C-alpha cells in the first residue's frame, strides 16, 4: 500500500474556505510565529556568545573532543598549548574511562605543572587543564622552608658552643693559634648568617623602620666584609653622602646590602679576573633612595634563578640570599632590579627618603 501524501498544516482548500478576516488572522499568526522564531534565534545566539565568553574567561584550558578524537571545541587557553592536549590524549588512550566518570591527574611539560580532568560523555569528551606551577612551587617552598628551619635550629646550639670556645682561644693571646681561631670565627659567622637567613625566610619578614645615616650603613658593610673570606685582591668603593638618612630596618636592610656585596665577591672569586672591584653607591631624591651594587666578576648565568629560593648557580650559594633580600626590600615597599648595560649593576630602590 502506497503511503498517502501528507497534507500541509494549511492546505490550499482550507485557505480557500476561509473568509477575509480569518485569512488575516492566519497571516498575523504566521507573522507572529516567524517573529518569535527570529527572536528565539537571537536569544540562542546571545546565549551562545555568553557561553563562549564564560569559557574564555575561565583560567583553565578546555577541549571538547568528538568520539573519534577529533577536536570539536577549544578555548583560547587550550589553543595556546596543543602539546598538553597531546600528552593528555596519550594518558586517555592508556587509561580508558567509562562514560560518566571523571579522571583526574597531573603532568609536567616545559617546566610547568598541570592538573587535568577528563570527563567522557555519550558522544563527546570534555578535557580541562589548569596550570598549577605556582601552587606546586609554594608547596615545595613551604616544605623546604620547614625542613630548613628545623635544621637551622638543630645547628644553632653546637655552633654557639664552638663560637664560645673560639672566643676563649682568641682571649688567651697565643700567637700560634690566633690565625686558626680567627678563621674559625669567620666560618662561624658565615654559618650564623646562613642560620639567621633561613629562619627569617621561614617565618616571614616584619620591618621596624627608623632613620639611619648612610655613614652607619657603610660602617656596617665594611665590618661585615672583614668577616668574609676571599682570596683575590678586591677593592671596595663606597660612595655615600654620610650625613644623609634613610628610613629602614637597619638590621634587615644591612642583610640586603651584605648579600649583594658578598655575591659580588663570590662572582669575582669565580671569574678569571686577577683583581676585583665592588662598588656601592646611593642616589636620593624626594621620592626614593636608590642603592647600586656593581662588580667586575663572573656574569650571571641564569637570570630566572636570581630570586628563586633554594636555587643557586654559585659554588658557595645556598639560594636564599637574594630571595631573602627581595622579601626584605618588598617589606620596605621597594623593589630590586638588574641593569646590564655593559656592566652588571643591581639596583635597590626604597621609598620615603628622609633628609638630614
Image (tube, rainbow, N blue to C red):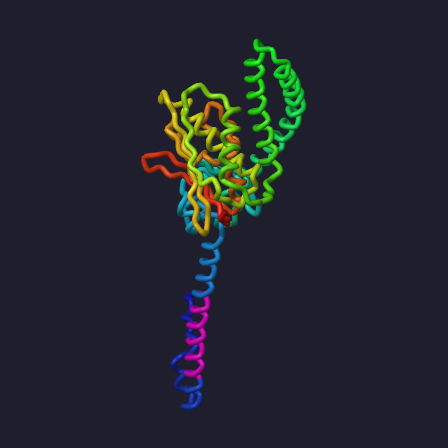
Q: Could you say where residue 155 lies in the image, as x and y percent from the top left?
A: 64, 24
Q: Residue furthest top?
A: 176
Q: Is residue 35 magenta?
A: yes
Given residues 14 and 43, the one toward you in this image is: 43
Which range is magenta? 26-44
Q: Quadrant of residue 184?
A: top right
Residue 264 vs residue 208: left or right?
A: left
Q: Quadrant of residue 204?
A: top right
Q: Residue at x 42, y 22 (%)?
A: 269
**From this viewpoint, is residue 86 visible?**
no
Q: Nearer the viewer, residue 172 or 325?
A: 172
Image quarter where the N terminus lies is bottom left
Identify the residue at the far bottom of this view.
20
Indicate whether residue 168 is drawn in magenta. no
Q: Position of residue 200 (x, y in %)?
A: 60, 35
Classified by dominant secondary structure, the portion drawn in magenta counts as: helix
Please tell me which residue is depicted at 51% across the width and 24% down the height of the picture. 228
Image vertical order of residue 176 relative to residue 312, above or below: above
Amino acid at each position: 500500500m502506497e503511503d498517502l501524501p501528507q497534507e500541509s498544516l494549511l492546505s490550499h482548500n482550507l485557505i480557500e474556505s476561509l473568509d477575509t478576516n480569518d485569512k488575516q488572522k492566519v497571516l498575523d499568526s504566521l507573522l507572529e510565529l516567524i517573529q518569535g522564531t527570529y527572536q528565539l534565534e537571537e536569544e540562542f545566539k546571545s546565549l551562545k556568545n555568553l557561553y563562549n565568553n564564560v569559557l574564555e574567561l575561565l583560567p583553565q584550558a578546555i577541549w571538547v573532543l568528538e568520539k573519534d578524537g577529533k577536536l570539536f571545541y577549544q578555548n583560547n587557553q587550550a589553543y595556546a598549548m596543543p602539546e598538553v592536549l597531546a600528552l593528555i590524549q596519550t594518558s586517555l588512550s592508556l587509561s580508558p574511562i567509562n562514560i560518566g566518570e571523571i579522571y583526574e591527574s597531573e603532568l609536567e611539560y616545559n617546566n610547568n605543572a598541570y592538573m587535568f580532568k577528563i570527563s567522557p560523555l555519550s558522544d563527546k569528551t570534555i578535557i580541562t587543564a589548569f596550570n598549577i606551577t605556582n601552587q606546586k612551587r609554594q608547596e615545595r617552598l613551604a616544605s623546604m622552608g620547614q625542613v630548613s628551619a628545623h635544621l637551622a635550629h638543630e645547628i644553632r646550639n653546637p655552633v654557639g658552643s664552638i663560637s664560645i670556645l673560639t672566643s676563649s682561644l682568641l682571649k688567651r693571646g697565643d700567637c700560634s693559634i690566633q690565625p686558626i681561631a680567627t678563621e674559625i670565627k669567620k666560618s662561624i659567622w658565615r654559618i650564623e648568617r646562613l642560620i639567621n637567613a633561613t629562619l627569617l625566610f621561614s617565618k616571614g619578614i616584619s620591618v621596624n623602620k627608623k632613620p639611619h645615616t648612610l655613614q652607619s650603613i657603610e660602617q656596617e658593610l665594611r665590618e661585615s666584609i672583614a668577616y668574609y673570606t676571599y682570596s683575590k685582591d678586591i677593592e671596595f668603593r663606597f660612595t655615600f653622602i654620610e650625613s644623609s638618612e634613610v628610613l629602614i630596618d637597619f638590621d634587615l636592610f644591612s642583610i640586603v646590602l651584605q648579600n649583594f656585596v658578598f655575591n659580588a665577591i663570590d662572582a669575582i672569586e669565580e671569574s678569571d679576573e686577577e683583581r676585583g672591584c665592588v662598588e656601592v653607591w646611593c642616589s636620593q631624591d624626594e621620592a626614593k633612595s636608590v642603592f647600586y651594587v656593581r662588580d667586575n666578576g663572573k656574569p650571571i648565568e641564569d637570570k630566572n634563578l636570581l630570586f628563586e629560593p633554594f636555587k643557586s648557580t654559585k659554588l658557595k650559594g645556598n639560594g636564599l640570599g637574594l630571595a631573602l633580600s627581595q622579601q626584605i626590600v618588598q617589606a620596605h615597599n621597594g623593589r630590586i632590579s638588574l641593569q646590564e648595560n655593559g656592566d652588571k649593576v643591581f639596583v635597590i630602590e626604597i621609598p620615603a627618603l628622609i633628609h638630614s
